[in-house]
Image (cartoon, rainbow, N blue to C red):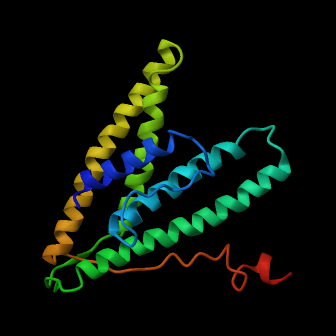
């Protein structure tokens, strides 16, 4: 898939989520199970739900018990998000496993999936800034439109960079290495706050 196709999938998912705007709504994945597209949709859905969970915990008057419940859910969501990103990288690792790197091939600073993760978040930012650029007074709209313009430029740059990275990996001009995130905060065998209890 080209990066613009990835973005269109994320954009579609964000729009579908906002039909109900409900953090407890089912994912509603329209793609066949165990396909790459289904994985991308789920990743985008997790991002979208998490975006809204984080909004719920921000108000100063949020009930502390509810805020803690949200925090726990956000932690689980972060772990799930990381797992999905790593599955996306597994897809690309398998896709390019037959490619012999050129002698002067370079390592990229991030894997395809972490760049795609940023594209998914960018789809959310653009969706929400499009709303804000039409809301409120003229000054608010102008400020939000300027930010939206920057986000749209970021989308153009990021989609180009993702396509270039995938092209380079396919041609052996770059080497793909997987370094797992190795999160500690959810692991009771690694987090001192959990294993000391």
Could you tell me residue 114's position as x and y percent?
A: 40, 65
Seen at 37% across and 74% down, the residue is 89
Q: Is residue 36 left or right of residue 131?
A: left
Q: In this view, does 117 lie above or below 25?
A: below
Could you tell me residue 129's position as x and y percent?
A: 45, 33
Residue in the foreground of this view, choosing between 38 and 88: 38
Residue 133 in which image quadrant: top left
Instruction: Evaluate whether residue 114 shows in this view.
Output: no
Q: Is residue 73 above or below residue 105?
A: above
Instruction: Evaluate whether residue 32 shows in this view.
Output: yes
Q: Is residue 150 left or right of residue 1?
A: right
Q: Is residue 37 above or below residue 12?
A: below
Residue in the foreground of this view, choosing between 16 and 149: 16
Seen at 45% across and 44% down, the residue is 16
Could you tell me residue 127's position as x and y percent?
A: 43, 38
Quadrant occupied by the C terminus? bottom right
Could you tell me residue 104's position as x and y percent?
A: 15, 80
Seen at 72% across and 54% down, the residue is 70
Residue 39 in which image quadrant: bottom left
Residue in the foreground of this view, choosing between 168 and 120: 120
Quadrant occupied by the N terminus? bottom left
């Amino acid at each position: 898939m080209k990066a613009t196709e990835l973005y269109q999938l994320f954009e579609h998912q964000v729009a579908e989520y906002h039909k109900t705007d409900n953090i407890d709504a089912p994912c509603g994945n329209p793609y066949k199970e165990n396909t790459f597209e289904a994985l991308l949709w789920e990743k985008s859905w997790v991002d979208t739900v998490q975006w809204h969970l984080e909004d719920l915990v921000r108000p100063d008057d949020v009930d502390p018990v509810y805020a803690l419940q949200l925090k726990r859910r956000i932690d689980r969501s972060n772990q799930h998000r990381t797992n999905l990103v790593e599955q996306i990288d597994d897809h690309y690792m398998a896709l390019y496993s037959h490619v012999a790197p050129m002698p002067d091939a370079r390592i990229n600073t991030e894997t395809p999936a972490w760049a795609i993760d940023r594209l998914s978040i960018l789809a959310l930012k653009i969706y929400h800034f499009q709303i804000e650029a039409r809301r409120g007074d003229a000054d608010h709209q102008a400020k939000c439109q300027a930010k939206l313009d920057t986000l749209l430029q970021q989308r153009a740059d990021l989609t180009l960079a993702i396509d270039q990275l995938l092209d380079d990996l396919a041609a052996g001009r770059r080497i793909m290495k997987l370094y797992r995130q190795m999160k500690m905060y959810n692991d009771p065998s690694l987090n001192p706050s959990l294993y000391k209890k």
